[in-house]
Image: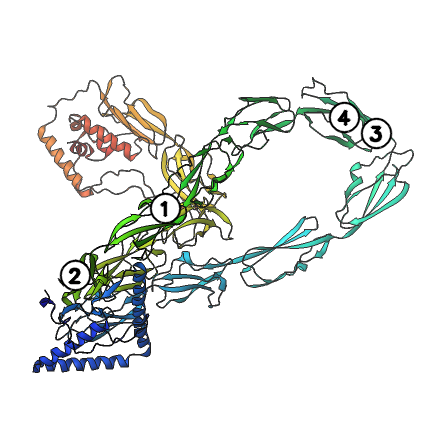
């Protein structure tokens, strides 16, 4: 086994001086030792000496020398390239090295803290020998260095790609650069070779930050505080919903803006909105004398001259300070105060002859001030002038008032009643007396529970007795309203219970059924009382019932109740206040009081969960030999009170004897020291394979050596995936000091790859990958760190990705979880006033929330605005809505609701009333007249106009087929209505038989109908042999020839009855009546018509004659002319040449 290790750890010459180890600081590393040798200088020196001996014993071949020269040249070039690197890159490289060293120190320090077991390197032990393996390639491959550049600036650390010779570098191997996209314009074709390659990749930005700056058409900024900041992709169109909302300005929503390539400001053009300043001229008491309006755009200058307005009797008193300035962002009102001018009145007292009987009186006060003339006492006179002139208002100009006096006294009676029939008196009558011309004002006495139809009787005594009429005053009961409030025993209103309102008349009895309320006892079922006040209030006292409250003491770790502290019950009365006091529990700490630890008892049971967290605790374990010598460092076990613990008793090299405490139990409330006693055992130690940082690679690969001191041993080293051993075998002598030691055996790491994936979780991008996967090579055991880029609206699963390179390739995934928010959407009008909203909701970032379906009735979204709001973390979103322009469809229909097919849409503002002409419907007449008034309302989308059908007539003729004259009743006229069904049978006429159809039916059209029934004598039975067969054939051929050459032309042109339509109304299309024009043959080709005698013997088919009469009905021609020719041409004359034959062909 020792031969397998080679001579790396062979014993040195006894005469050879020992190598002096240089002194090192504890925190410093000897840079003369190659990386990966575990910090052993002696082992490193032995390796270098062996390499020199091998080179000296085996001279290099010529080809190998050339390769070495090439390698030296490449190394020099590499050194030159490194020397020419910018200082910034050198600093980055130096910082990487320093951080790597610092990382090694930190990891070593951490490992020392975790385990204080003594670890010894094989290089430090002269009695241990190893055999070296050298597997380095003769001609190594060179890496590909990739640089990432945006506009000439470096945006990421270089990526170094290494692999087998000839391996292609793929785009998928490159790491993603957050916020940038690769701008690849040439073929990407690079592969690993023996020459180092440098590739420069150019990128452009992915998401950029931009600012929406509101400006006017001339690029003047409107308000810097309204600038909004966003992130987006370059060249993406910016949604109009993101534009800032500014009072007095409106953006051009049809203009489109895109995100700039490098971000920055995006100027959004706004137009000024029209504003109105209303000038109100009013008195100091608020009486409006007049108004003016001034219009302009937001920010424009205005100046108002109020002196141009004049109001008779008034003058300007107080002017506002802002009669000039700039139009604000919303409508504004200005109030101009006007004061009345001074005025006066002069009163003259005269008798019937116009002689003054008292000194004149003068009064003065402002215009429109009320005045009252106090009558002086003039012995022997009473006023005869109208008392109304004693009160009035001062006029714009002085005026004179003349009072006339005359001696007279008059009296009238006031009677009081409880009914209008004057059957039930309400009290004693009152007598009112006074001088003629004197005014009287008699107050009507009040009666409890009643209201008089007048509160006072006013007037003046007339000089005529019949003018002083008695007055009847009628009392009626007062309408009353009672409010019943449901309260508890302390007169507190019961929550969520509205007052009960009942109305009636004074003195009437009312009954109110009381509701049952959870948690309270109803005092009685029905409240019965009488109305005794106009506004009456009643209190109904409910008795609170006892409800339960349960207190639970919960352990936050187990989520269960704490042992020894069961649930407590604390009952109380509904609608009363409660408060829960927590318990002090040994070994536990109350985290916080829940929200419902205090409150009001409700009808439902209440559960209060008090959450306690167990206190932290520790157990200190001392492991000593029988002589109280500490054999291993003190061990500290930490946990929480009441949690189980277990102490490991095994110590390598020692045998467990006893313990001061149980090795298993639960953590106490305070610190516990446990002492374990041991006695020595056989010497055993462990060979531990370590990585380049001196850390244990895999405990499964450790080799335990057991034996007595002085015993020789030899052991093969294991093969560990991802690592290469610096030796293959180790041997030596067992010493007592090795007991329990772990002797490090250094291994060199291989290079492996970590691949980083990114994925979205939740939101609109769920399952998609925000960045391209990238792979990073590195030595096994080293640490890979990656600062995770941020994405707006998403939260990465970790801020910093830290992993170790494993012996196998690894795939790590960063999950970006979408952020959620509680949002509130409000609808505002053009003035910024709140007009509605949507229920509060919860959504994820960039989730579209449709607002169109929730717009308040009577409003709609702006044109061109997205119907969705995209959540961006703002929580509150304000959506501008515009008042609706409503459309109503006028529909013509009958009284039973049948649609007549004529419709027309009209529009107007909500609640507006417009007058329109009724729709033209052929055959119908509007019932309510030719004009209709339409009121636009949110609930009215149609407006039916009721029509009734016009009257029509059916005229029936009865004709003798032989003579062409009328028989029986000359004409029969039937009245019908348009579109009405008719079914008419030929009347029986004595001595005649109808030879056409005996029944006609159909629907009344736009024109009156005239039809004819053809009869023949009942004795004129037709003989089938009376007509020669050759004559029949000849006549048939002539009729066929005539029909072939006939031409059919329309007999009626389209006519439209055009009423005075407005330009917004629909004009009905032209319609023509169903009309048939008889075929017209060319004159030179008309066949010879047979004689009457031949016709009389022709056998006509009844069905073809009947069809002919139907054609006449459709053409609605006038067949009432007299003097019809007799014979075979009767049918041809009535219905057109050849019609009977044509109808027979159609029938066949």
Q: Is residue 742 visible?
A: no
Q: Are marks 1 and 3 in contact (CB under 8 Å)?
A: no
Residue 268 located left or right of residue 417: left
**Residue at the front extreme, as displayed:** 627
* Mark number displayed over residue 383: none
Q: Is residue 370 left or right of residue 542?
A: right
Mark 2 sits on what residue?
A: 721
Name which of mark 1 and mark 3 comes first in the sequence: 3
Q: Position of residue 897 (x, y in %)?
A: 38, 32
Mark 3 — residue?
A: 434
Return the residue nearer the eye: 606 or 370: 606
Q: Residues within 10 Å of mark 2 (few under 14, many from 20)?
A: few
Q: Secondary structure at mark 2?
A: loop
- Left/right placement of residue 415 relative to residue 494 reads right
Q: Quadrant of residue 253?
A: bottom left
The correct choice, above or below, for 424 with respect to 347 in the image is above
Please name the residue that numbered disc 4 is placed on: 469
Q: Nearer the viewer, mark 1 or mark 2?
A: 1
Dot 3 alpha-carbon crowd within 10 angstroms: few under 14, some 14 to 19, many 20 or more: some
Helix, strand or loop at disc 1?
Answer: loop
Please give the residue where the numbered disc 1 appears in the rendered image. Answer: 667
Residue 490 appears in which quarter of the rendering? Answer: top right
């Amino acid at each position: 086994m020792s031969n397998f290790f080679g001579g790396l750890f062979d014993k040195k010459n006894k005469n050879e001086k020992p190598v002096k180890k240089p002194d090192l600081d504890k925190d410093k590393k000897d840079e003369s030792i190659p990386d990966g040798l575990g910090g052993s200088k002696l082992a490193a020196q032995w390796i270098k000496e062996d390499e020199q001996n091998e080179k000296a014993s085996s001279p290099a071949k010529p080809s190998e020398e050339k390769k070495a020269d090439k390698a030296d040249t490449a190394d020099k070039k590499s050194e030159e390239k490194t020397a020419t690197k910018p200082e910034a890159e050198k600093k980055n490289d130096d910082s990487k090295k320093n951080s790597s060293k610092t990382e090694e120190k930190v990891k070593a320090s951490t490992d020392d803290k975790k385990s204080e077991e003594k670890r010894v390197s094989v290089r430090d032990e002269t009695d241990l020998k190893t055999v070296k393996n050298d597997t380095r390639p003769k001609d190594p491959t060179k890496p590909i260095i990739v640089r990432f550049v945006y506009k000439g600036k470096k945006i990421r650390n270089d990526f170094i790609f290494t692999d087998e010779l000839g391996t292609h570098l793929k785009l998928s191997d490159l790491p993603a650069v957050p916020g940038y996209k690769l701008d690849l314009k040439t073929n990407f074709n690079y592969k690993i070779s023996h020459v180092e390659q440098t590739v420069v990749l150019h990128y452009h930005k992915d998401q950029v930050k931009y600012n929406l700056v509101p400006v006017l058409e001339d690029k003047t900024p409107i308000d810097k505080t309204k600038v909004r900041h966003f992130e987006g992709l370059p060249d993406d169109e910016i949604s109009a919903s993101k534009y800032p909302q500014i009072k007095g300005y409106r953006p051009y929503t049809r203009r489109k803006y895109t995100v700039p390539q490098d971000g920055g400001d995006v100027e959004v053009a706004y137009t000024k909105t029209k504003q109105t300043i209303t000038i109100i001229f009013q008195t100091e008491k608020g009486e409006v004398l007049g108004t003016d309006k001034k219009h302009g755009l937001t920010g424009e200058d205005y100046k108002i001259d109020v002196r141009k307005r004049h109001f008779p009797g008034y003058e300007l008193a107080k002017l506002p300070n802002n009669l000039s300035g700039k139009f604000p962002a919303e409508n504004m009102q200005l109030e101009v105060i006007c004061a009345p001018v001074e005025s006066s009145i002069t009163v003259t007292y005269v008798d019937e002859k116009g002689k003054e009987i008292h000194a004149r009186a003068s009064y003065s006060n402002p215009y429109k001030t009320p005045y009252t003339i106090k009558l002086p006492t003039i012995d022997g006179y009473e006023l005869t002038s109208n008392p109304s002139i004693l009160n009035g208002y001062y006029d714009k100009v002085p005026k004179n008032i003349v009072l006339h006096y005359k001696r007279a006294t008059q009296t009238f009676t006031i009677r009081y009643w409880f009914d209008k029939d004057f059957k039930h008196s309400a009290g004693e009558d009152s007598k009112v007396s006074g001088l003629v011309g004197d005014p009287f004002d008699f107050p009507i006495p009040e009666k409890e529970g009643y209201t008089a139809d007048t509160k006072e009787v006013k007037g003046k005594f007339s000089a005529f007795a019949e003018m002083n009429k008695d007055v009847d005053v009628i009392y009626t009961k007062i309408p009353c309203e009672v409010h019943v409030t449901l309260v508890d025993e302390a007169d507190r209103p019961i929550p969520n219970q509205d007052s009960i309102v009942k109305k009636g008349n004074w003195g009437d009895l009312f009954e109110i059924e009381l509701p049952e309320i959870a948690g309270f006892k109803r005092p009685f079922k029905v409240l019965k009382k009488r109305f005794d006040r106009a506004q009456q209030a009643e209190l109904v006292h409910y008795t609170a019932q006892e409800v339960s409250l349960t207190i639970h003491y919960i352990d936050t770790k187990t989520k269960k109740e704490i042992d020894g502290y069961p649930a407590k019950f604390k009952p109380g009365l509904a609608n009363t206040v409660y408060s829960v006091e927590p318990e002090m529990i040994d070994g536990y700490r109350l985290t916080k009081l829940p929200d419902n630890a205090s409150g009001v008892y409700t009808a439902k049971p209440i559960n209060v969960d008090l959450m306690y967290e167990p206190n932290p605790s520790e157990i200190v374990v001392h492991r000593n030999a029988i002589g109280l010598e500490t054999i291993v460092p003190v061990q500290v076990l930490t946990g929480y009170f009441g949690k189980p613990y277990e102490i490991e008793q095994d110590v390598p090299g020692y045998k467990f004897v006893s313990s001061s405490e149980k090795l298993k139990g639960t953590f106490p409330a305070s610190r516990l020291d446990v002492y374990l006693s041991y006695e020595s055992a056989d010497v055993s130690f462990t060979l531990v394979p370590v990585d380049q940082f001196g850390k244990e690679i895999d405990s499964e690969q450790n080799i335990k050596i057991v034996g007595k001191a002085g015993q020789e041993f030899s052991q093969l080293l294991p093969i560990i995936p991802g690592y290469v051993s610096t030796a293959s075998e180790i041997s030596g002598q067992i010493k007592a000091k090795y007991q329990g030691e772990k002797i490090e055996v250094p291994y060199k790491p291989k290079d492996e790859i970590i691949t980083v994936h990114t994925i979205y979780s939740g939101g609109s991008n769920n399952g998609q990958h925000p960045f391209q996967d990238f792979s990073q090579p590195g030595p096994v055991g080293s640490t890979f760190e990656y600062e995770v880029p941020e994405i707006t609206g998403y939260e990465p699963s970790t801020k910093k990705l830290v992993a170790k390179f494993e012996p196998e390739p690894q795939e790590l995934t960063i999950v970006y979880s979408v952020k959620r928010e509680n949002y509130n959407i409000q609808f505002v009008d053009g003035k910024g006033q709140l007009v509605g909203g949507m229920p509060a909701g919860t959504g994820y970032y960039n989730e579209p929330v449709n607002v169109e379906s929730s717009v308040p009735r009577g409003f709609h979204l702006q044109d061109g605005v997205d119907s969705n709001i995209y959540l961006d973390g703002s929580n509150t979103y304000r959506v501008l809505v515009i008042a609706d322009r409503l459309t109503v469809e006028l529909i013509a229909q009958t009284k039973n609701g049948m649609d007549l097919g004529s419709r027309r849409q009209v529009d107007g503002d909500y609640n507006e009333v417009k007058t329109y002409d009724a729709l033209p419907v052929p055959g119908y007449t509007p019932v309510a007249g030719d004009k209709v008034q339409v009121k636009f309302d949110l609930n009215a989308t149609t407006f039916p106009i009721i029509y009734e059908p016009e009257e029509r007539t059916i005229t029936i003729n009865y004709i003798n087929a032989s003579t062409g004259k009328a028989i029986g009743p000359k004409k029969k006229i039937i009245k019908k209505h348009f579109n009405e069904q008719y079914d008419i049978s030929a009347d029986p006429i004595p001595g005649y038989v109808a030879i056409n159809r005996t029944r006609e039916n159909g629907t009344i059209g736009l024109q009156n109908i005239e039809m004819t029934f053809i009869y023949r004598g009942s004795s004129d039975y037709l003989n089938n042999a009376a007509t020669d067969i050759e004559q029949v054939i000849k006549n048939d051929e002539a009729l066929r020839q005539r029909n072939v050459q006939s031409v059919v032309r329309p007999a009626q042109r389209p006519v439209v009855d055009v009423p005075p339509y407005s330009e917004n109304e629909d004009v009905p299309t032209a319609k023509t009546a169903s009309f048939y024009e008889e075929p017209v043959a060319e004159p030179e080709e008309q066949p010879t018509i047979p004689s009457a005698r031949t016709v009389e013997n022709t056998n006509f088919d009844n069905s073809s004659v009947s069809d002919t009469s139907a054609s006449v009905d459709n053409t609605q021609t006038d067949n009432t002319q007299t003097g019809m020719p007799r014979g075979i041409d009767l049918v041809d004359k009535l219905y057109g040449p050849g019609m009977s034959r044509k109808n027979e062909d159609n029938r066949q």
